[in-house]
Amino acid sequence: MQFTLIETFRWEPQTGFVRLDQHLRRLSRSADALGFRQPTDAPALLDALETGDTPLRVRMSMNFRGRIEITTSPFAPLPEGTVWKLRLASARLNSEDSLYRHKTSRREPYEAARAEFKPEEADEVLMLNERGELCEGTITNLFVGCGDGTFLTPALSSGLLPGVLRAEMIRERKAMSRVLLPADLVGRPLYVGNSLRGLIRAEFIEEQTRAEAIAVAHEKQR
């Protein structure tokens, strides 16, 4: 195998690892589906981690032999009131490629989508599949507000990574999966999120809006 399985999660000084059981279950399911050895050493390696008084981002990677490497770095939560700008990539995901339903180091489509926009143009980039259905962001799942405190999130049949946070929200009936189209992003509360960062408020920047902004800027320069 020329790629590794990956799980990324948070450690908090007061509560320890966040959603650890869910991450280990997903790692085990992916190992079984892709023919990797099972990650038997993960609990002991995590127990041996050096921690401290500040939150950590924990990244676990595992090769096909079941060998696990764990790295940590300080985790800084986003400031309160943060709103991420969302753009839509022209790069597409193939809904028939089951590899991308597992979190691995194979990230070519996501990297291509992220490269379409400069960092100041987009905080996250959403991807469609070959049918024009919404899938996910390059590092997050998508959540569209229903107006009653619940969310819609793209269906697995569209071809996407079933994130740990997404699974938790569906299990707790805070979100429902459904086939979504770009039109569903307009005029509705939007969030993106993952297990590391939680839910992040977002706004969709349409290309038409972008073109209008450029036109207004040109008018002001005259």
Image (spheres, helix red, strand yellow):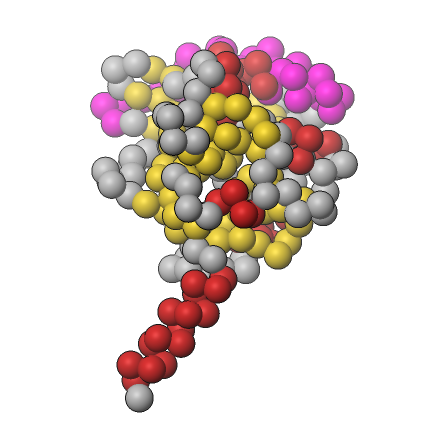
Q: Is residue 11 above or below residue 117?
A: above
At 73% from the left and 32% from the top, the residue drawn is 98
Query: Picture coordinates of residue 40 (x, y %)?
Result: 60, 11
Query: Picture coordinates of residue 78 (x, y %)?
Result: 29, 39
Query: Picture coordinates of residue 167 (x, y %)?
Result: 52, 20
At 50% from the left and 40% from the top, the residue drawn is 139
Q: Is residue 104 visible?
A: no
123 sits to left or right of 27: left
Which quadrant does the C terminus fall into? bottom left
178 sits to left or right of 144: right
User: Toward which corner of the image does residue 147 lie, by quadrant?
Assistant: top left
71 sits to left or right of 73: right
Which quadrant does the N terminus fall into? top right
Q: Is residue 183 visible?
A: yes
Q: Is residue 109 above or below residue 42?
A: below
The verdict on residue 29 being magenta is: yes
The verdict on residue 40 being magenta is: yes
- What span is colored magenta in the figure? 27-54
At 62% from the left and 22% from the top, the residue drawn is 67
Query: Picture coordinates of residue 30 (x, y %)?
Result: 66, 22
At 69% from the left and 30% from the top, the residue drawn is 157
Q: Nearer the viewer, residue 101 or 72?
A: 101
Q: Nearer the viewer, residue 132 or 81?
A: 132
Q: Residue furthest bottom?
A: 222
